[in-house]
Image (cartoon, rainbow, N blue to C red):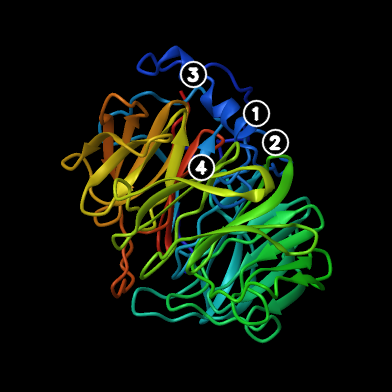
Amino acid sequence: MFRLSAVSCGMVGLRNRCAGAQRNPAIAPGQRWVAALVALASGTLMISTTRADWPQWRGAQRDDVSTETNLLEQWPEGGPEQLWAIDSLGFGYSGPAIVGDRLYIMGVRDDHETLLCLNAADGAELWAAEIGELYHNDWGDGPRSTPTVVDDRVYVLGGQGMLCSFDAKSGEKDWSKSLVDDLGGKVPAWGYAESPLVDGDLIVCTPGGDKGAIAALDRRTGEVRWQSADLKDGAHYSSMVSAEINGQPQYVQLLEKRLVGIEPKSGALLWSEDWPGRVAVIPTPIVHGNEVYVTSGYGAGSMLVRIGEGNAVEKVYDDKVMKNHHGGVIRVGDYVYGHSDQVGWVCQEWETGKAAWRERSGLGKGSCTYADGMLYCMDEDEGNVALANASPEGWQEVSRFQISPKSELDRKRGKIWTHPVVCDGRLYIRDLDHLYAYDIEE
């Protein structure tokens, strides 16, 4: 049953704001334009969207850096105002993709993975469309990836490997392809978790396997354009990024055993570097200029490589400072922020790999996002959400609250793993079937 609770529900309209200098005095003046400039400096390619949108995994640039400004620098006791909450999503860890006044997220209905379209202002369901067979796992059932919204279409990848295109307005399905049956892939141990990448007329994904680890399809028809037959690596759980390195457009992906750069028109391998991520390779690579940063948990650590002339790969460092499991890492200025297994929250120098600081006592293991000079960090065990200055001077928490009510679904061995999202003056948090929206606009 669909239940909706709201404070000032329906009173929250779509806000259009211009990016400006961040007003947080704790952030150094040189960092105040980071949110607006980091995407341009990174060399990543951008999905065309309005400033307030969050159209895909980790936002328009796939870097988890929001361009939002005029956000609260401190929350009231008990947390920011909860605008609405619903408990009708079903199982899954899919994050929200938000374009205009619509929010797209994946869940479960009638034992099938489902794409849901909600009104972003009040959480009301507009339509639901079936994706495919439900993925079951001891660590939690349901879809893992985030929808990708481009123009009038929504693209999704289910846990069993069903890649689908839907009409964003009506929910009508255009086409579907199985990464297993049609592209020769194999479902990874914890299900397909990649959020599909759209680049121009292509939708690009990672089926893995002997037919080619990476595949590009025509996003309008689902027809296969190419499959990288020279790459036979298994698929893991990372989502690729589109970038330009040394003037060469490419897709950068972290596969089961290595980091690769792929030529977009043919799927040919441009360069690779071994990355034995051990049990699971999950976090999205970060590209900045001609440098690529990756990290994984289970003791793997972090690595920075520099791509030179002729696609020569130079390893800058390979260390254990950042061992990020699946909560994601964010580059802000010259530093990387995230949670490191058995270490705590870490600020790591981009160029050297050294730790600027470590914090073990502030907040438990979890995920994070960035907006308006601040880190929004959430622990996976209790749903505590912390607001902290993104500063290399140390962990600077200013506010905290706990989500409520939490999901009562059987988590099995899973936890609160969906990453927080900041979009259009709202903070979105998911806990399995629950989705919450908080007002964080000043």
Mark 4 / mark 2, whichever is N-terminal? 2
The answer to whether residue 137 is left or right of residue 236 is left
User: CB of mark 1 within 8 Å of CB of mark 4?
Assistant: no
Mark 1 / mark 4, whichever is N-terminal? 1
Q: Circle 2 is placed at which residue position?
A: 50
Residue 165, position in %: x, y?
73, 67
Mark 1 / mark 3, whichever is N-terminal? 1
Q: Circle 4 is placed at which residue position?
A: 64
Gap between marks 3 and 2, in whole Å?
21 Å
Q: Which mark is residue 116?
A: none
* Residue appearing at x 23%, y 49% in the figure: 364
Gap between marks 1 and 3, in whole Å?
20 Å
Please say whether residue 403 is visible from this viewpoint.
no
Q: Circle 1 is placed at which residue position?
A: 16
Residue 393, position in %: x, y?
28, 24
Q: Circle 3 is placed at which residue position?
A: 32
User: CB of mark 4 within 8 Å of CB of mark 2?
Assistant: no
Instruction: Please determine whether, in this image, residue 84 is positioned above or below residue 89.
Output: above
Q: Residues within 10 Å of mark 3 (few under 14, many from 20)?
A: many
Q: Residues within 10 Å of mark 4 (few under 14, many from 20)?
A: many
Observer-nearest of 218 and 411: 218
Frontmost of labels 1 and 4 is 4
Which amino acid lies under the numbered mark 3 shown in the image of this protein? Answer: Arg
Residue 156, position in %: x, y?
64, 65
Gap between marks 3 and 4, in whole Å?
16 Å
- Please, which residue is most extreme toward the left here? 361
